Image (spheres, rainbow, N blue to C red):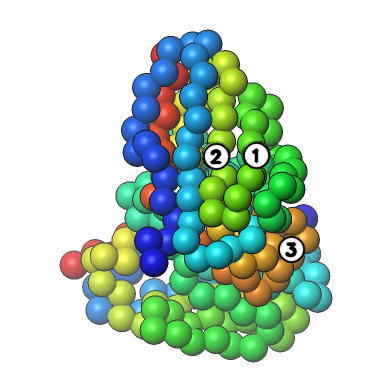
Amino acid sequence: NAGVTQTPKFQVLKTGQSMTLQCAQDMNHEYMSWYRQDPGMGLRLIHYSVGAGITDQGEVPNGYNVSRSTTEDFPLRLLSAAPSQTSVYFCASSYTAGYTDTQYFGPGTRLTVL
Amino acid sequence: DAKTTQPPSMDCAEGRAANLPCNHSTISGNEYVYWYRQIHSQGPQYIIHGLKNNETNEMASLIITEDRKSSTLILPHATLRDTAVYYCIVNTGNTGKLIFGQGTTLQVKP
């Protein structure tokens, strides 16, 4: 299994540009989520999905959109990039959102918005 | 949401046991304690989790107090590769949301 994969690894955008961060998992996990990590900080939840066709907002959803058309993929869209969205983005997945289901993280996408 | 408190940093000599404490005094009955670590801004790596009994796996041991208000992660023989930020997290099991604090930066020294 490849686990959780993320593309691209690095990205530089100009303010106002849009882009999609890709996340895929091959573990047949129902639950997927996106976090962002700012320098020196812990991770904060952006959006999550408990299954295909179902998404919900996390702690810091503004400026981001998600959709979940398949079990494997959970893309994160930046509609109009802002410098405040400069961060490292991590995708995670687990079988469910339950107490005992371990979440596995991808390697991250490092995004810089100029 | 249950929150955790960890010391910001700790040092440990290579080959010695590293004991990382965590307070989670507001934890609820069904919530599990999870430990992750993050090396050089890579994706967080799962270490271990537990409810109320002590747990051990190939990476570490987890000791949870009887009242479940605190826990300790033990790396039995720390190596230089264990230098990382360690996060103690309570899994609320509701939305799957993991609440990350700032963690403990463990520096293993030769």
Q: Position of residue B40 (x, y in %)?
A: 33, 49
Crowd around label 1: few <14 · some 14–19 · many ≥20 (10 Å): some
User: Mark 3 Cα within 10 Å, few/some/many (few <14, many 20+)?
Assistant: many
Residue drawn 80% across and 70% down? B28
* Type of the residue with mark 3: Thr
**Location of residue B12 with respect to B62 vertically, above or below:** above
Which image quarter: residue B89?
Answer: bottom right
Are dots 3 and 2 in contact, CB under 8 Å? Answer: no
According to the picture, the residue beneath numbered tag 3 turns out to be B92
Classify 10 Å Cα crowding around label 2: few (below 14), some (14-19), many (20 and above): many
Q: Which residue shows up at 39% across the image and 67% down it?
A: A1
Q: Which residue is mark 1?
A: A67
Query: What subunit carries mark 2?
Result: A
In the rendered structure, which disc, 2 or 1, sits on the residue that comes first in sequence?
1
Image location (x, y in percent) of residue A12: 37, 22
Q: Is residue B16 visible?
A: no
**Quadrant of the rendering where the C terminus of chain A is positioned:** top left
Q: Dot 1 falls on which chain?
A: A
Q: Position of residue B59 (x, y in %)?
A: 39, 79
- In the image, which disc is placed on residue A75? 2
